[in-house]
Amino acid sequence: MEIALNIILQLIAAILIKLASLQIVKTNLTDAILSPYYIGAIVCFGLQTIVWQKILLKYELYFAYIWNSLFYVGILFSSSYFFNEKISVKNIYGVSIIILGLIVISISKLQKIKRN
């Protein structure tokens, strides 16, 4: 549960940062930094840091970090949905490799747990 929340908070923060950066083109830097998008991103990153600490208490460091790679899967589809960014076949291959890697590592982790 915490891992999913961690990834969701990262995704929201990334989307908000993108929205804030789009404002910089229209306004000056100070106004952009004080925008609700930027402030929301900072709040999400702060909450994500707290969630991440809880994750690190429960899981081995390598195992926690590999699940963080799901952020890249989420950001690919989020950027397409929110910003009409294109998804290429190479993007799909890359996401597939990430997911396959997670499956392989998860299976090996489960096998390790069963042996102990």
Image: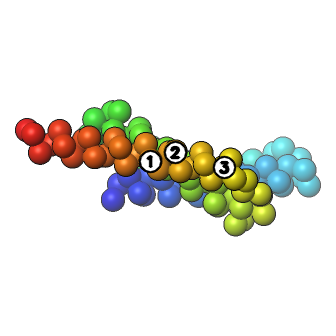
Q: Which mark is residue 100?
A: 1
Going from N to C along the chain, the mark reached first, 3 or 2, is 3
* Residue depicted at x 53% and y 50%: 96
What is the tally of numbered marks visible in this picture?
A: 3
Q: Nearer the viewer, residue 56 or 71?
A: 71
* Residue depicted at x 79% and y 49%: 21
Circles 2, 1 touching at the beta carbon (< 8 Å) = yes
Circles 3, 2 touching at the beta carbon (< 8 Å) = no
- Residue placed under numbered mark 2 in the picture: 97
| Left or right of residue 18: residue 29 | right
Q: CA distance from mark 3 to mark 2?
A: 10 Å
Three-letter residue code for mark 3: Asn
Q: CA distance from mark 1 to mark 3?
A: 14 Å
SS at mark 3 in the image: helix
Q: Report the residue that reaches farthest toward the right.
A: 26
- Residue placed under numbered mark 3 in the picture: 91
